[in-house]
Structures are given as C-alpha cells and as structure tokens.
Amino acid sequence: MAKFWLHKSLNNEEMNGQIILLLNTVVEQNYFQYNDQFFKLAKGTAMGSPISGTIAEIYLQHTENEYIKQWLDSKEICYYKCYVDDIILYNQNKTQAEQILHNINRIDENLQYKITTKEHRSINFLDLTIHRKENNIDISIYSKATNTDTTIHYLSNHPFEQKIAAFRYINRMITLSISQANRNMEWATIISTAKNNGFPENIIRNLRTKLALKKQKQKPTTKELNQKWVPFTFFGPAIRRIINLFKGSNIKIAFRTTNMIHKQLSKEPFNIQNPSGIYKLKCNTCNKIYVGQSGRAIDIRYKEQIRYVRTNNPQSAYAIHILQNRHEYGPSNNTLQLLKACTKGMRMNCWEAMYIQKFHQKE
C-alpha cells in the first residue's frame, strides 16, 4: 500500500525504496511485554509507535480508493464521510445496510466494522447527534453514556490554564449551528460539570464571553503570528511572578506539571541484582503477609528483620508478630519476595501504600 501511494508521488525510485525500507524496519519493531513475557504482533502496528497512526491512515485511504470510490461511483452508496475510525453513510435504501456492512467486512478479515443505524430519525456521529427532519437536518451536541463530569478540580495544584482547558469545548457550543434550545441544554451541562468540580460559575461565564469575542475577531495580528511558546515547570502560584516578566513580549508560556503519576511510580532501580524497593515477608505458620520498604538492598533488610527476631528485639511489626505469637520464619528464598524495585523517596512511599492496600483487601 505504501508503494501504491509512493508511486503517485514525485520521488525517484531510489527515494521510494529507502522509504519502504525504513517503514519495514519500523513496522517490524512491534514487540510488547505482558506478564513478564515478550510477544510479537502477528497483525497490525505497535501501540504507542509515532508512526502507527500514519500507517493506519495510509491503509484506510487505500481501502477507500480501491473499494469505497467504486461503490460511490455506482451509487451503491450515496454519501460517505470518514474521520479516523468513525464513518457515516447514506444510501437512500437502494442497498440494505446489512449488505453494505457485509461488503465492507469482506475487504479485510482482520478489520471488521460494526454498524449503527438511525433511531427515531436520528444518528450519532463523532460529537454530534444528527436529526433528520422533513425539509432539513438539525444537529445537537452528543455525549457518550460513559461520559463523566470529572475534570481537574479547581483547587488542584495545577496551572489555571490546564484546569480551564477542559471547558474550552464551550467554543463548540458557540460555533456550531445548533438551535437555541440545544445550546441552552449544553450550557446547563457545562455549568453542572463546573460546579461539580469546584469552579465558580463566573469563571465559566467569563470564558464563554472571551470565546464569543474571539469568534468575532478578524485575522490574527502580525504580533500574534510571531509569538513563540516556551515551557515552564509549574510548582505553584508563585511561578506567575516570574512569567509576568514576559508580558508585552512575543513569548507565550506553556506550563508543565511535576506531580504526574508516572513520575512518582516509574523509575529503574540502581541495583538490578539485589535492588531496593517494596518487599513482603511471610509468616510460615499462619501465612500472614508483612509489607515493607527498604532504601537499601532488600537482602540486607531481611537480615535485619531476622536479627530482631533472634535477639527478641521488637523493632519491626514482623518481629513483633513472630515473637508474640511464637510463629516460625524461614529462609529468604521462601519467606522474602520483592514486590516492586524502586529507589528511596516519594515513589517508594506510593508503591508501599498501594501494596499494603492490595494485601489488606485480600485478607
């Protein structure tokens, strides 16, 4: 398929050959890991690869050019529009919907579509509900049943620009050609979502006014076209004293946060063979579990725990349990287990709390 599109380009054969070679190299790197095992996809592209979306788009365009175009020319399908993986079709009942679905699913057995037909003269497409009337078409804003009204809370330690970004879809309500009744319904939903996440109503109303004025504004000025964006790490409101220095310049500030979950939970340990991290100790008599953390090698921490037991030293919860209940402990190979390798710090505290909760729920 890539060859098909490349032959339509103005590149020479040598360039096309190099592009195909690079594509094959990238596409073959579709390995993934699950449950401590590595797998290779038999079909499709690797999830998360920057080029996967482009390859998928090339394939869909090839399918449309080879099959859909013919059906449109023969009037088997009267109208066809596609956005990523959402397709809307119109066929004037000339061809039954199930037959169209059957024909499309025959193109590639590994790519199967599902069909949704109109109900009560309405159908959902992307974020719209399209209502078919006698003489015209009416649209309203559609939200999936799984949609929640959860956004970044107003009191969260995030840049205000990131918190308010969840409500910039007000622009959709302003610009779409929808009826006043549908516009009022969407506005009520937005206000309800804002209140549920701690936002004062006046902030949302001010945003609506700002976006409405922006819609009326003409082309951007030369100053706006020459603006440059610079990232700043957001630690708290005090950072605004620094960014105020850039007011009146052509520099725009984009904030990034530090309190992201993956930064707290993902970091490779320094010692792979005998790492630090979260561990569990098992009582060999009652099989109860003790979860702890160690900034040093867990084998060292295990020896300390056993020394507390042997010297009747109640320095740890594990030693207290063994001593008070006269239970037995065992060698490290059947008593000690590493749960998560990580380094000392906040992320270690997070992992420890998670595993304590996990084993507490099992009891």
Image (spheres, rainbow, N blue to C red):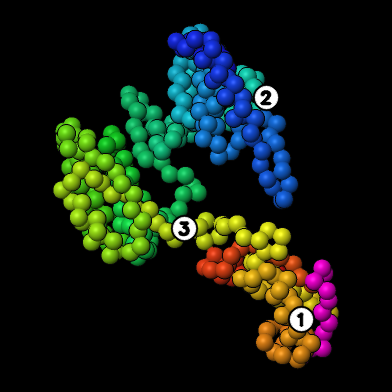
Left or right: residue 323 compared with residue 235: right
Which region is colored magenta? 324-334
Q: Which is in the foreground here, disc 3 or disc 2?
A: 3
Q: Is residue 13 left or right of residue 44?
A: left
Three-letter amino acid code at the position of disc 2: Glu
Give the residue displayed 63% in from the left and 19% down from the top: 107
Q: Residue at x 33, y 44 (%)?
A: 169
Tell me the residue that label 1 is attached to.
306
Q: Which element is circle 2 on?
A: loop
Mark 3 and mark 2 residues within 8 Å of each other at the beta carbon: no
Q: Is residue 8 above or below residue 206?
A: above
Mark 2, residue position: 109
CB-based contact (under 8 Å), mark 2 and mark 1 = no
Near-viewer residue (69 or 122) = 69
> In front of the other: label 3 or label 1?
1
Amino acid type, callout 3? Met
Could you give the CA–CA distance between mark 2 and mark 1, rounded to whole angstroms?
60 Å
Task: Residue at 44% x, 33% y: name it.
Answer: 125
